[in-house]
Amino acid sequence: MAIEIAIETPLQDDMRGLVKELNETLLELTPPEHCYHLTVEQMAGQDTTVFIARDNGIAIGCGALKRHGGAIGEVKRMYTRPSHRGQKIGASIVERVEALARQEGLKRLVLETGDRHPAAWTVYERAGFLRCGPVLDYPDSKWSVFYEKSL
């Protein structure tokens, strides 16, 4: 298996498929009004860089860095297909997001994830993120768990 992670445009059919799977997964666990999805069109904006993980050319995971004011970056749209979970693909994508954020001089990474996503919590905590209160303009909700990491 040859897993490669690279910056790519999200405006590809296979990325649209990943995002569709991600959204379906999130909506099984969280009410729609508490899901903060970026569309692939939004992810294609100048403020966002998308990483796609591929296994022999097939898209199997993704994640993104969205830039905000105040030298803050946000980890968004993290997903690994069930067939490839447990292989540290999410951790590798988070490493790439963090490396890019540092390279660009960002001072802090933040993220919002769901209250029923313990596998995601493990990825972020192993990467050195700490739980915190609400970040950016997210509402304080029982459905959300927030993390931050100083760079």
Image: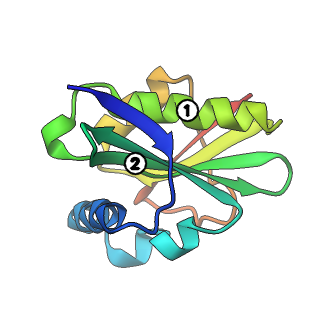
**Residue 10 visible in the snapshot:** yes
Residues marked 1 and 2 touching at CB (< 8 Å): no
The residue at which mark 2 appears reads as 62
Residue 130 can be seen, yes or no: no
Q: Distance between the residues labelled 1 and 2?
A: 11 Å
Identified at 16% across, 44% down, the residue is 82
- What residue appears at the point 76 percent right and 57 percent down from the top-left corner? 68
Q: Where is residue 72 in the image (x, y as percent from the top left)?
A: 76, 47
Q: Is residue 98 left or right of residue 39?
A: right
Q: Residue 91 appears in which quarter of the rendering?
A: top left
Quarter occupied by the N terminus? top left
Label 1 sits on residue: 96
Q: Which amino acid does label 1 sit on?
A: Arg
Element under label 2?
strand
User: Which residue lies at the image location 24% right of the left edge and 62% below the top edge?
Assistant: 21
Estimate the x, y position of residue 36 in percent, counting from the top left.
48, 68
Residue 71 percent across, percent down from the top left: 83, 46
Which colour assignment does the render follow? rainbow
Q: Sequence-wise, which precedes: disc 1 or disc 2?
A: 2
Vertical placement of residue 97 versus 33, above or below: above
Front residue of 56/50: it is 56
Q: Circle 1 — which element?
A: helix
Mark 2 surroundings within 10 Å by alpha-carbon count, few (fewer than 14), some (14 through 19), many (20 or more): many
The residue under label 2 is which amino acid type? Cys
Residue 105 rendering spot, x and y as whole percentages: 83, 36
Say left or right for 101 vs 78.
right
